[in-house]
Image (tube, rainbow, N blue to C red):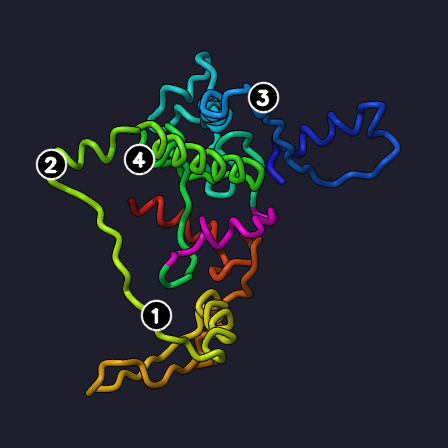
């Protein structure tokens, strides 16, 4: 627990509504007001505007001398901190969002997630912090709203393509090749193996070019150096995730 969280917990324990209980940690709760506008398009745009505001990284106050240091504009930039509220994300459970934002989609190995100063990917610069699960859920929803907005704000898309001589023609490819039911059944197991960093070997037929044999290799030397996986940051593949991230930041 950070000094800020410890101080906040002490103050909260002094409040009448929390005096009777024994508390040793804090959990972040994000209250986001979904727009109730009757027009779905305007409702979505209002939600996007509100989400962008809610996800803006917290800046230092103008009177803080650290604000004018190099890289001191934003308050929460440590790898384990949420850039919005400054909470410690080490023990947070990200659930289903973990695989989407903290793993490479191809290898399923742990990758670094860095929020942007402008919230939207590519806008501004990336910070060394993270999002707590509540803010990451809002960020995920924001990307969905933006994707929907971009898909509906260009009603003349096909007309413009037609002027360029481009057209889409429906085709029929025929029945798809049937996949063996055992491959379908065991595919999730191979995905979990990738998450755990297990080596997967593929033997390709030199004549047909098809994959003939797939093997999962349990290398004891690798297993001893790999931490258990899950959806909590401190239990990720990298045993000392935040220490590794800090060293990466120093090298950049």
In this view, 49 is above or below 150: above
Residue furthest to the right: 20
Label 2: which secondary element: loop
Along the line of sight, the residue nearer the viewer: 8 or 205: 205
Q: Which mark lies nearer to you, 3 or 4? A: 3
* Label 2 Cα crowd, 10 Å radius (few <14 / some 14-19 / many 20+): few
**Mark linked to residue 122:** 4
Indicate the quadrant where residue 28 lies.
top right
Residue of label 3:
36
Marked residue nearer the N-terminal end (3 or 2): 3
Quadrant placement of the N terminus: top right
Residue neighbourhood size for the residue with mark 4, other residues' Cα within 10 Å, grouped as few (<14), some (14–19), many (≥20): few
Separation (CA) of disc 3 from disc 1: 45 Å
Q: Residue at x 80, y 23 (%)?
A: 15
224 displayed left or right of 252: right
Q: Residue at x 30, y 47 (%)?
A: 251
> Is residue 61 found inside the magenta-colored segment of the image?
no
Q: Kindly report which numbered mark, 3 or 2, lies closer to the viewer in this rendering.
A: 2
Name the element at disc 1. Answer: loop
- Mark 2 / mark 1, whichever is N-terminal: 2
> Residue 122 at what x, y percent from top left?
30, 35
Residue 92: in magenta span: yes
Residue 219 visible in the displayed image: no
What secondary structure is found at the residue carrying circle 3? loop
Q: Which residues are magenta?
A: 90-105
The residue singled out by tag 2 in the image is 164
């Amino acid at each position: 627990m950070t000094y800020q969280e410890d101080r906040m917990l002490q103050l909260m324990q002094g409040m009448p509504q929390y005096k009777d209980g024994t508390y040793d940690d804090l959990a972040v709760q994000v209250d986001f007001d979904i727009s109730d506008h009757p027009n779905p398009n305007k409702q979505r745009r209002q939600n996007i505007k509100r989400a962008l505001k809610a996800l803006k990284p917290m800046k230092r106050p103008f009177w803080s001398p650290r604000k004018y240091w190099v890289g001191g504009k934003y308050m929460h930039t440590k790898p384990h901190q949420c850039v919005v509220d400054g909470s410690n994300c080490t023990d947070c459970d990200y659930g289903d969002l973990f695989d989407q934002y903290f793993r490479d989609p191809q290898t399923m190995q742990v990758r670094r997630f860095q929020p942007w100063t402008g919230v939207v990917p590519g806008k501004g610069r990336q910070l060394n912090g993270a999002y707590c699960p509540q803010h990451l859920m809002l960020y995920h929803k924001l990307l969905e709203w933006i994707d929907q907005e971009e898909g509906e704000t260009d009603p003349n898309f096909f007309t413009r393509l037609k002027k360029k001589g481009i057209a889409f023609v429906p085709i029929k490819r025929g029945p798809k090749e049937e996949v063996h039911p055992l491959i379908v059944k065991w595919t999730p197991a191979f995905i979990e193996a990738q998450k755990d960093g297990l080596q997967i070997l593929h033997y390709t037929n030199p004549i047909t070019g098809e994959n003939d044999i797939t093997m999962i290799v349990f290398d004891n030397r690798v297993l001893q150096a790999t931490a258990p996986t899950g959806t909590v940051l401190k239990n990720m593949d990298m045993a000392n995730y935040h220490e590794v991230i800090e060293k990466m930041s120093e090298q950049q």
